Image (spheres, rainbow, N blue to C red):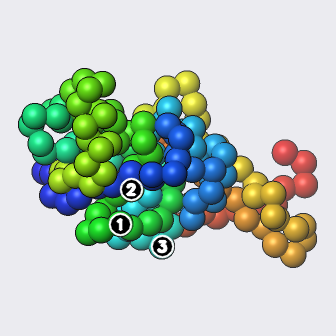
Amino acid sequence: MGFIHSRAAYYPNSDEHGTDVGACGFGSFGATINGGDVSAASDLYRNGVGCGDCYQVRCTNSHYCSDKGVTVVITDQGSGPNTDFILSRRAFGRMAQTKDAAASLLALGVVDIEYRRVSCSYPNKNITIKIDENSNYPYYLAFILWYQQGDKDITAVQLCETQNF
């Protein structure tokens, strides 16, 4: 798949990792998944279907940016000035060739990028279904999927009750 041109910013008030809150409901896990290389997305959030999707994002300024860029996981919804991604500080800096170039990118704040969807990979992990702590048996059940491998969307999940597993 080819690259799509856009722009990216970063969470200016975050630490190196992502944020502990986010529209995807990952909580503190969302700040550290993928080593903290995470992002909020605008249109790519897709009303939550985009949560957990992985994208290769690379900035296009050849003076500062590496050809590889960084792979990020969508953990939040958000938009900035004409941007598709708002990256964690760590992910934003990892688009650069060197630490000095990373500092220069962070000083710019918003950069031109190109991105494409890629497969998520979590070595030694299986897909995990986490019951949301706001669930209130028997009236309300909410859950979140963690460690979704590959590049396909999960758009529906079917559950069944078992008496004795």
At label 2, counting other C-alpha atoms closer than 10 Å, the crowd grade (few under 14, some 14-19, many 20 or more) is many
- The amino acid type of the residue labelled 3 equals Asn
**Mark 1 / mark 3, whichever is N-terminal:** 3
- The amino acid type of the residue labelled 1 equals Gly
**Vertically, is 132 above or below 91?**
below
Whole-percent x and y of residue 36?
Answer: 50, 37
Q: Secondary structure at mark 2?
A: strand
Whole-percent x and y of residue 55?
Answer: 32, 47
Q: Residue at x 29, y 44 (%)?
A: 107
Q: Which mark is residue 80?
A: 1
Q: Are marks 3 and 2 in contact (CB under 8 Å)?
A: no
Locate residue 10 relative to residue 135 in the image: left or right.
left
Q: Which mark is residue 47?
A: 3
Q: Secondary structure at mark 1?
A: loop
Q: Are marks 1 and 3 in contact (CB under 8 Å)?
A: no
Whole-percent x and y of residue 1?
Answer: 16, 50
**Mark 1 / mark 2, whichever is N-terminal:** 1
Locate residue 14 relative to residue 135 in the image: left or right.
left
Q: Nearer the viewer, residue 94 or 44?
A: 94
Q: CA distance from mark 3 to mark 2?
A: 17 Å
At label 3, counting other C-alpha atoms closer than 10 Å, the crowd grade (few under 14, some 14-19, many 20 or more) is few
Residue 56 visible in the displayed image:
no
